[in-house]
Amino acid sequence: MPIHIVQPGSPRRPGEGLRLGTVRRPPRGVPKAEFASRDFYDVWQPLLSPSAELVAEAKAAADEKAWDGFRRKFKAEMNHPAASQLLDLLAALSHQTSMAVGCYCEDEAHCHRSVLRELLVARDAKVV
């Protein structure tokens, strides 16, 4: 019963469970009532998304040094109490139920969801 790391809008996998959108903004042009049926997410959790400033920094990261700077700053944001507590909750729930977290980025290696994966694994979450 692990946490799956996904790209919202991609087809759901069997056993994926509840899908959490860890994105700053809802999908454009998609009615709220259709978020789940169109495989974006069931519950929106922008608390697990980088701040608007960091989203811009991530998009502009042209090399590994810039990407590492983004990762360091995003991890600092996730150390704030509310985000940290939510990560702790997801890690604990991963031992009881399946769920998915995700972001729109095409390349997980240069997306905050790769950092979420690291943070969840560090909390002993079951992650696929």
Image (cartoon, grey):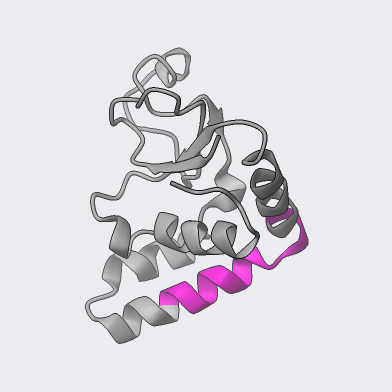
Magenta stretch containing residue 46, yes or no? no
Region in magenta: 70-83
Residue 10: x %, y % from top left: 28, 31
Left or right of residue 121, residue 68 in this image:
left
What residue lies at 52% left-to-right and 69% top-to-bottom?
74
Give the vertical position of 83 relative to 102 (above or below): below
What residue lies at 50% left-to-right and 57% top-to-bottom?
116
Quadrant hosting residue 123 = bottom right
Left or right of residue 51, residue 108 in this image:
left
What residue lies at 35% left-to-right and 67% top-to-bottom?
58
Residue 72: x %, y % from top left: 50, 78
Residue 60: x %, y % from top left: 28, 71
Give the vertical position of 54 relative to 25 (above or below): below
Left or right of residue 36, residue 59 in this image:
left
Of 121 and 101, which appears nearest the observer?
Answer: 121
What residue lies at 39% left-to-right and 45% top-to-bottom?
103
